Amino acid sequence: MDRLIEKLVNLYGPSSKEDAVKSFIKGEIEQEVDEIGDDKFGNLVAHIKGSGEKLLIAAHMDSIGVIVTDIDKNGFLRISEVGGLRKSFLVGQKLLFENSVEGFVFYEDKESPWEVKDPKIEKFYVDIGVSNKAKAKELVQIGSMGIYKPYFYRLNKRIIAPSLDDRAGCAVMIGVIKNLKRKKLRYDPYFVFTVQEEVGVKGARTSTYEISPDIGIAIDVTDWGDTPETQHIAVSLGEGVAIKVMDGGMIASKVVRDELVKVAKRENISYQMEVITAGTTDAFAMNITKGGVLSGCVSIPTRYVHSPGEVEDIGDIENAVNLVKKFIEK
Ligand code: CO
Ligand code: ZN
């Protein structure tokens, strides 16, 4: 599982530029599904023909990033946010742009040149190693997007990387697809690898409308509450997969939540209940599309979400695969 996640986090895929992630995933699952294809909005939709209610399971392919807004005469890039970037972490980071262009982020403040006192996005700039605007324009354009330069490492049971949100969720869904017992299907499952989640859960909205499922489940990261002086959140790494009760956008449908708990108990899968107050997932969009869809979310407890170093427990990820797989099977 960690090899697969490593491959996924190494791919370039900020919101709206998910193509590399999509073609990798397609290669992984093509042989395992009955139908697969892109929809008009760019989501990758895979269908395994089952019977019973239509189930849509989603994990998003996109990551947060930055977008070039301006290039100054000395070739420095000015940037804006793609998704919920945590700006105070930007200084000193390496960024990766399209075509393997790399850059280094620093910060401009006459009063405080070495300390980030005012983390407004306008104050950060990117040095891509050129000395003028013309040279910079050979490498990037207005609208080019950058991500935190990918890396991946494992420390005991923990993995650390940028964009575990939501490449870990994509890995979980790939794991489910590969391990599903076709003869035991309880639903008619559609697996949607969505685009543009980080900029307003957009891919889930369009695909839910198109597929019109009876039940929707997102697989995504959630916040943590087990480091010093964090929020009062009852989610800890290593304590099991999290089953969402509520987040900043959605109250999970009771039937879906109860069914997930029932399956976890029956199969002896470690789980924890999750209530967070900020942030949301694709399940929020599913929940309120068309006449409404019974929706829930299977979450991977994740520290430092949207920072350059997100941390997860490999055991929780394995529990997530198991829970979703057993949920779909009889
Ligand atoms: Co996110
Ligand atoms: Zn996410």
Image (cartoon, helix red, strand yellow):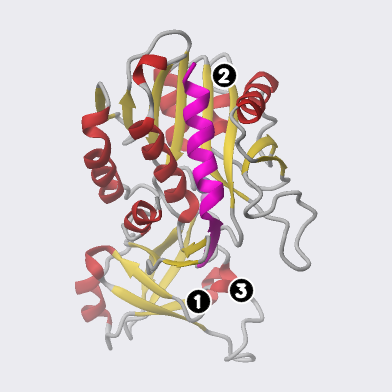
Q: Which mark is residue 124?
A: 1
Q: Amino acid at mark 1?
A: Phe
The answer to whether residue 178 is visible is: yes
Q: Does residue 120 appear in this view?
A: no
Q: In the displayed structure, does residue 65 sit left or right of residue 263?
A: left
Q: Residues within 10 Å of mark 3 (few under 14, many from 20)?
A: some
Q: Identify the disc placed on residue 293.
A: 2
The residues colored magenta run 309-330
Q: Which amino acid type corresponds to the residue marked 2 in the rendered image?
A: Val
CB under 8 Å between discs 1 and 3: yes
Looking at the picture, does residue 26 appear above or below residue 144?
Answer: above
Evaluate if marks 3 and 2 touch, with contact meaning CB atoms under 8 Å apart: no
Give the camera-side residue of 49 and 16.
49
Say left or right for 30 vs 204: left
Q: CA distance from mark 2 to mark 1?
A: 41 Å
Magenta part mainly helix, strand or loop?
helix
Q: Tag count in the figure?
A: 3
- Residue lying at 25% horizontally and 22% vertically, measured from the top left: 35
What residue sits 38% from the left and 27% below the top? 180
Q: CA distance from mark 3 to mark 2?
A: 39 Å
Residue at position x 49%, y 16% from top?
A: 330
Element carrying mark 2: loop
Position above or below: 308 against 296: below
* Residue 119 image label: 3
Residue 314 shown in magenta: yes
